[in-house]
Image (spheres, rainbow, N blue to C red):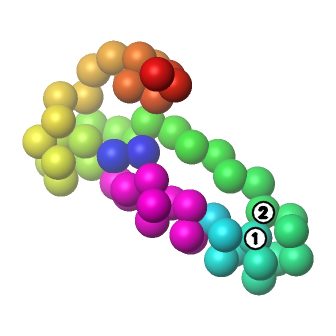
Protein backbone atom coordinates (compact mmCIF):
# COMPACT_ATOMS: atom_id res chain seq x y z
CA UNK A 1 0.00 0.00 0.00
CA UNK A 2 2.75 2.54 0.62
CA UNK A 3 3.84 2.40 -3.01
CA UNK A 4 0.69 4.01 -4.46
CA UNK A 5 -1.83 6.57 -3.37
CA UNK A 6 -5.46 5.45 -2.91
CA UNK A 7 -6.49 7.46 -5.96
CA UNK A 8 -3.80 5.88 -8.17
CA UNK A 9 -4.75 2.41 -6.93
CA UNK A 10 -8.42 3.04 -7.74
CA UNK A 11 -7.68 4.41 -11.20
CA UNK A 12 -5.37 1.52 -12.05
CA UNK A 13 -7.86 -1.06 -10.79
CA UNK A 14 -10.70 0.57 -12.75
CA UNK A 15 -8.64 0.55 -15.94
CA UNK A 16 -7.65 -3.11 -15.57
CA UNK A 17 -11.25 -4.01 -14.67
CA UNK A 18 -12.49 -2.36 -17.84
CA UNK A 19 -9.81 -3.97 -20.02
CA UNK A 20 -10.54 -7.42 -18.55
CA UNK A 21 -14.32 -7.15 -18.96
CA UNK A 22 -15.00 -7.13 -15.22
CA UNK A 23 -12.64 -9.95 -14.23
CA UNK A 24 -10.39 -7.78 -12.06
CA UNK A 25 -9.88 -8.85 -8.45
CA UNK A 26 -8.01 -6.33 -6.35
CA UNK A 27 -5.67 -7.56 -3.64
CA UNK A 28 -4.08 -5.00 -1.35
CA UNK A 29 -1.06 -5.74 0.81
CA UNK A 30 1.20 -3.89 3.17
CA UNK A 31 4.20 -3.97 0.79
CA UNK A 32 7.63 -4.45 2.32
CA UNK A 33 10.27 -2.57 4.27
CA UNK A 34 12.18 -1.58 1.13
CA UNK A 35 9.22 0.42 -0.19
CA UNK A 36 7.87 1.68 3.12
CA UNK A 37 11.20 2.75 4.60
CA UNK A 38 13.29 3.30 1.48
CA UNK A 39 10.82 5.20 -0.70
CA UNK A 40 8.65 6.91 1.90
CA UNK A 41 10.72 7.02 5.09
CA UNK A 42 7.91 5.35 7.06
CA UNK A 43 8.97 2.67 9.53
CA UNK A 44 7.80 -0.80 8.50
CA UNK A 45 5.89 -1.74 11.63
CA UNK A 46 2.29 -2.36 12.71
CA UNK A 47 1.24 -3.14 9.15
CA UNK A 48 -2.07 -4.70 10.17
CA UNK A 49 -3.04 -1.59 12.12
CA UNK A 50 -2.02 0.58 9.16
CA UNK A 51 -4.26 -1.34 6.76
CA UNK A 52 -7.28 -1.44 9.09
CA UNK A 53 -10.21 0.78 8.24
CA UNK A 54 -10.57 3.69 10.63
Which residue does the image show at 77% across and 78% down from the upper left? Answer: 18
Q: Give the Cα distance between marks 2 and 1.
A: 5 Å
> Which residues fall within the magenta stretch?
3-12
Indicate which disc residue 17 carries.
1
Q: Position of residue 32 (x, y in %)?
A: 35, 39
Instruction: Give neighbour class at mark 2: few <14, some 14-19, many 20+ (Cα, 10 Å).
Output: some
Which residue does the image show at 17% across and 48% down from the upper left? Answer: 40
Which residue does the image show at 38% across and 56% down from the upper left? Answer: 5
Q: Where is 10 relative to 14, above or below?
A: above
Seen in the image, is 13 located left or right of residue 22? Answer: left
Instruction: Give neighbour class at mark 1: few <14, some 14-19, many 20+ (Cα, 10 Å).
Output: some
Which residue does the image show at 18% across and 53% down from the upper left? Answer: 39
Q: Examine the residues drawn in magenta and state their main secondary structure.
A: helix
Q: Which SS class for mark 2?
A: loop
Seen in the image, is 23 located left or right of residue 32? Answer: right
Q: Position of residue 1 (x, y in %)?
A: 42, 45
Picture quadrant where residue 19 is located: bottom right
Q: Which SS class for mark 1?
A: helix
Seen in the image, is 28 located left or right of residue 7? Answer: right
Q: Where is 28 relative to 53, above or below?
A: below
Q: Position of residue 10 (x, y in %)?
A: 56, 61
| Residue with the mark numbered 2 | 24
> Is residue 7 part of the magenta span, yes or no?
yes
Indicate which disc residue 9 carries.
none
Badge 2 vs badge 1, beta-carbon distance below 8 Å: yes
Total labels: the figure holds: 2
Amino acid sequence: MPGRSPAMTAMTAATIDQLSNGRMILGIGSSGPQVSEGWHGVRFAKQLARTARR
